C-alpha cells in the first residue's frame, strides 16, 4: 500500500511536468498549427541558460529570472519570428520537419558550448520528507506537483476568466472573425508562444534537479509530453493536463507492476489504443479548436 | 642537372619520412560524447597528460609520442567504425574504448591487425575470450565482484540484498558475478532489478527496493544513472546501506548527486583519493591542468600510456608485433617507472593484479576505509 502511494505521488509529480510541456504542444497547435518537435529540447535549454547565468556570478534566484526571460525571448519570440512565421506558409509538415531540425541544432549547440557531460542543477524545493496521511512523502515531489498545479490553474484562469484569455480563444477558434471584431490576432498568437516558453522554462526548473542538466535530457520528455498531448486531446488544454498526469502515473505503475524492461512500451500501447478507439483523445473534441 | 634535382628531391622525401617515423603513433577511441562522456573525457585527458609528461622528458627511447583521439559517441557501432579507421593508420598501440560493450566489438579488429589494445572496460568476459592482444587498465569484474560480495556479507552483515544493475554488457557481467558470489556466501538476493542506460526516472525502481526492504543495496549503474538513483533513494527515504563499485562513488557521481552520495560505499581498483604519494601527485597535476578532480578513468588513461612506455623500454625497441607478448606476465614496479603509480602485474590473459581500496563517501569526499593488497 505504501509502495503504491509512493508510486502514485512520484508518478503525479513526473506527470505534472509532462502536463506543463504537453500544454505547450496544444497551445501552439491551437493558435498556429505548429507541432513543435523541439519541445523536449525547449525544456532542456532553460536549465543551461540558468547554469550559464550562475556561472557568470548571478545568484540562483536572479539566474532563474534571467533564464526564464531569455527562454521567452529565444524559445518564444525568436522561435516564432525566425522559424514558425517563414515556414508556416508552406504548411504543417515542412514546419514540423523544421522543428525537428531545430531540436538537433539545440542539442548539438548545448553539447558544443557547454559539455556533453551531465551537470548538477540546484533544486528550488528543499530535500526532505513530510508526512501526509501517515505516509512520508518527499518535499521535492510535493513541490513539483504544487508548482505545476499553480501554473496550470493560472493558465486556465487566464484563458477562461480574463478578457485577454477570451481574445486568445477567439483568435484560435476563428482568426478571421476575431480580426473583424478587433482582436489583435497576431499579438495573441505571439502571446501563446511566450506562454509556451514560460511553461517549458518552469518545467526545466522543476525536472532538471532530478534528471540532471544534459543535452540529451529533452528527448524522453518531449516524447512523453507528445504522447500525453495526443492521449489527452491535442485540442484541449485540460486534455493535455489529464494526459500528462495519466502518462506519468502509468509509466511508474507499469515499471513496478508490469515489467521494468517494457515500461517505455506501455504508454505507447496506451497511445495506440487511444488512437484506435478515441482518436480525438480522452478529453478532446473532434474537429474543433479551442484554447 | 636533372639527376642532381632528382637526388635532391629523393633526399627531401627521405628526410621527411624519417622525421615522421620519429614519433610513435598511438590511436585513442573513446566515449567523448553520449552517455559515457564522463568516462571518455577523463580517459582522454589522462592520456594527454601522460603524453605531455613523457614528451617533456624526451619521449620513449628518444622518440616522441603522438596520439589521435576519435569519438565513439558511446555507441558500440560507431566505436567499431572508429577503431577500424584508427587501425587503418597502423598505430603502435590502440587505446580505449572505455565501455565494455564497445571493447567487445572492437577487440577482434585489433587482434586481427595484431595491434595491442589497452582499454578501460571492466566486463568479466572481455579477457576470457582468448584474445592475445587485449589488456586492462583496471580490475575485471571477476576480480572485483567477489571482493564486493564478501564485503556485503562479512562487513555489512547483510542477509538480504537488492541488486540494481544497468542492462548492458558491463552491468550484466557484474550482476552475474556478484549474484553468484552472494548466493555462495549465503546472502539472499531479494530484488534483482535491471535498468536502462540513460534512464532518467528511478522512482519505480526505488519503490521496488523499498518494498523488498533489504539489509543492503548493491548498485551497479553507469555514473550519471548512479547519481540519479542516489538522489531518488534519498528522496524516497531508503536507509539501507549502499554498496557498489567505482561507478557508484566516483568524483563525477559525487558532484552530480551532492548530499545523496554521502554514506555510499564502493570497492575501487583505482581512486585519486588513494593514500599513495604518486597518485596524490597525479591528482594535483591533473587538477592543475584541467581544473577539475579526475575520476578513475583519468587514472586509467594515464596508466595506459605509461604501460606503453614501460613495455617499449623493456623491449628496447618499438615493435608493435612483440608488444603484446612482452606485456603478458610483465611486472612493472612504481619504483622503476613512477608513471605506473602502483606496482602492477599483467597476467597471460591481459588481466591485472594490483592493490585496491574500499571507499566511503563522507561529506562529499571519497574516504579510503581499507587497503586490499595485491594478490601475488
Image (cartoon, coloured by chain):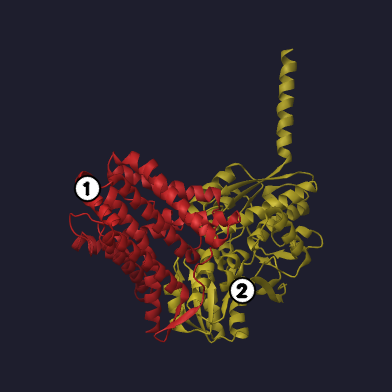
Query: Could you say whether the residue bearing mark 2 is in a helix, strand or loop?
Result: strand
Mark-to-mark CA distance, 2 and 1: 65 Å
- Chain the render paints yellow: B
Residue A260 in sight: no
Percent of width and height locating residue A92: 28, 45
Q: Which residue is mark 2?
A: B266
Given the image, what chain letter belongs to the residue carrying mark 2?
B
Q: Quadrant of residue A60?
A: bottom right
What percent of the width, then of the height, locates residue B137? 65, 61
In the image, what residue occupies the spot 44% across and 57% down? A201
Q: Is residue B36 left or right of residue B90?
A: left
Which element type, helix, strand or loop, lies under badge 1?
helix
Residue B203 screen position, x and y as percent: 43, 73
Task: Establish if B14 lies above or below A219.
Answer: above
Q: Is the C terminus of chain A in the top left, top right, bottom left or bottom right quadrant?
A: bottom left
Chain ID for red? A
User: Going by the image, does B183 lie left or right of A7?
Assistant: right
Can residue A257 be seen from the camera position used here? yes
Position in image of residue B47 (x %, y %)? 67, 53
Instruction: Provide the residue designation for mark 1.
Output: A178
Which mark is drawn over residue A95? none
Q: Is residue B71 above or below residue B158?
A: above
Camera-near label (2 vs 1) is 1
Q: Is the Cβ of the residue at disc 2 closer than 8 Å to that at disc 1?
A: no
Amino acid at each position: 500500500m505504501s509502495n503504491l502511494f509512493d508510486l502514485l505521488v512520484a508518478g503525479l509529480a513526473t506527470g505534472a511536468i509532462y502536463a506543463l510541456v504537453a500544454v505547450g504542444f496544444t497551445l501552439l497547435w491551437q493558435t498556429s498549427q505548429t507541432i513543435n518537435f523541439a519541445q523536449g529540447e525547449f525544456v532542456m535549454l532553460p536549465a543551461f541558460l540558468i547554469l550559464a547565468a550562475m556561472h557568470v556570478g548571478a545568484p540562483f534566484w536572479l539566474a532563474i529570472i534571467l533564464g526564464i526571460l531569455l527562454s521567452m525571448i529565444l524559445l518564444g519570440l525568436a522561435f516564432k519570428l525566425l522559424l514558425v512565421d517563414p515556414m508556416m506558409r508552406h504548411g504543417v509538415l515542412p514546419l514540423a520537419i523544421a522543428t525537428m531540425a531545430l531540436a538537433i541544432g539545440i542539442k548539438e549547440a548545448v553539447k558544443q558550448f557547454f559539455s556533453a557531460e551531465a551537470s548538477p542543477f540546484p533544486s528550488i524545493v528543499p530535500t526532505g520528507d513530510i508526512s501526509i496521511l501517515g505516509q512520508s512523502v518527499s518535499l521535492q515531489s510535493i513541490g513539483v506537483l504544487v508548482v505545476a498545479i499553480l501554473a496550470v490553474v493560472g493558465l486556465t484562469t487566464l484563458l477562461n476568466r480574463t478578457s485577454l484569455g477570451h481574445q486568445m480563444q477567439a483568435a484560435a477558434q476563428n482568426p478571421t472573425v476575431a480580426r473583424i471584431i478587433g482582436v489583435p490576432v497576431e499579438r495573441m498568437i505571439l502571446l501563446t508562444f511566450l506562454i509556451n516558453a514560460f511553461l517549458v522554462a518552469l518545467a526545466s526548473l522543476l525536472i532538471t534537479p532530478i534528471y540532471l542538466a544534459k543535452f540529451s535530457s529533452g528527448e524522453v520528455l518531449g516524447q512523453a509530453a507528445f504522447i500525453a498531448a495526443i492521449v489527452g486531446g491535442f485540442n484541449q488544454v485540460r486534455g493535455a493536463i489529464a494526459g500528462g498526469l495519466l502518462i506519468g502515473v502509468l509509466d511508474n505503475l507499469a515499471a513496478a507492476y508490469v515489467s521494468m524492461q517494457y515500461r517505455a512500451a506501455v504508454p505507447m500501447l496506451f497511445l495506440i489504443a487511444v488512437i484506435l478507439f478515441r482518436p480525438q483523445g480522452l478529453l478532446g473534441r473532434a474537429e474543433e479548436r479551442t484554447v | 642537372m636533372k639527376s642532381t634535382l632528382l637526388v635532391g628531391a629523393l633526399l627531401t622525401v627521405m628526410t621527411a619520412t624519417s622525421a615522421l617515423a620519429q614519433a610513435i603513433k598511438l590511436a585513442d577511441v573513446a566515449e567523448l560524447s553520449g552517455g559515457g562522456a564522463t568516462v571518455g573525457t577523463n580517459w582522454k585527458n589522462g592520456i594527454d597528460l601522460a603524453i605531455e609528461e613523457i614528451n617533456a622528458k624526451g619521449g620513449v627511447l628518444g622518440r616522441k609520442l603522438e596520439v589521435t583521439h576519435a569519438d565513439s559517441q558511446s555507441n558500440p557501432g560507431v566505436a567499431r567504425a572508429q577503431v577500424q579507421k584508427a587501425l587503418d593508420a597502423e598505430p603502435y598501440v590502440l587505446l580505449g574504448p572505455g565501455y565494455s560493450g564497445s571493447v567487445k566489438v572492437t577487440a577482434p579488429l585489433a587482434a586481427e591487425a595484431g595491434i595491442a589494445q589497452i582499454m578501460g572496460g571492466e566486463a568479466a568476459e572481455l579477457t576470457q575470450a582468448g584474445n592475445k592482444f587485449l589488456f586492462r587498465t583496471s580490475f575485471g569484474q571477476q576480480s572485483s565482484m567477489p571482493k564486493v560480495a564478501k564485503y556485503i556479507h562479512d562487513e555489512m552483515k547483510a542477509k538480504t540484498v537488492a541488486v540494481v544493475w544497468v542492462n548492458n554488457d558491463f552491468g550484466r557481467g557484474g550482476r552475474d558475478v556478484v549474484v553468484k558470489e552472494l548466493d555462495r556466501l549465503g546472502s539472499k538476493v531479494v530484488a534483482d532489478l535491471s535498468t536502462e542506460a540513460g534512464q532518467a526516472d528511478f522512482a519505480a525502481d526505488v519503490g521496488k527496493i523499498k518494498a523488498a526492504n533489504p539489509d543492503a543495496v548493491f548498485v551497479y549503474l553507469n555514473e550519471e544513472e548512479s547519481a540519479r538513483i542516489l538522489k531518488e533513494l534519498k528522496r524516497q527515504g531508503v536507509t539501507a546501506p549502499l554498496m557498489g563499485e567505482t561507478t557508484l562513488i566516483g568524483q563525477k557521481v559525487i558532484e552530480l548527486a551532492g548530499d545523496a552520495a554521502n554514506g555510499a560505499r564502493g570497492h575501487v581498483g583505482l581512486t585519486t583519493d588513494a593514500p599513495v604519494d604518486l597518485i596524490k601527485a597525479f591528482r594535483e597535476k591533473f587538477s592543475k591542468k584541467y581544473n577539475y578532480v579526475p575520476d578513475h578513468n583519468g587514472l586509467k588513461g594515464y596508466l595506459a600510456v605509461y604501460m606503453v612506455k614501460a613495455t617499449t623500454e623493456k623491449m628496447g625497441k618499438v615493435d608493435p608485433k612483440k608488444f603484446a607478448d612482452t606485456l603478458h606476465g610483465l611486472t612493472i614496479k612504481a619504483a622503476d617507472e613512477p608513471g605506473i603509480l602502483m606496482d602492477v602485474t599483467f597476467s597471460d590473459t591481459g588481466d591485472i593484479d594490483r592493490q585496491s581500496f574500499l571507499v566511503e563517501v563522507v561529506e562529499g569526499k571519497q574516504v579510503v576505509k581499507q587497503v586490499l593488497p595485491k594478490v601475488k
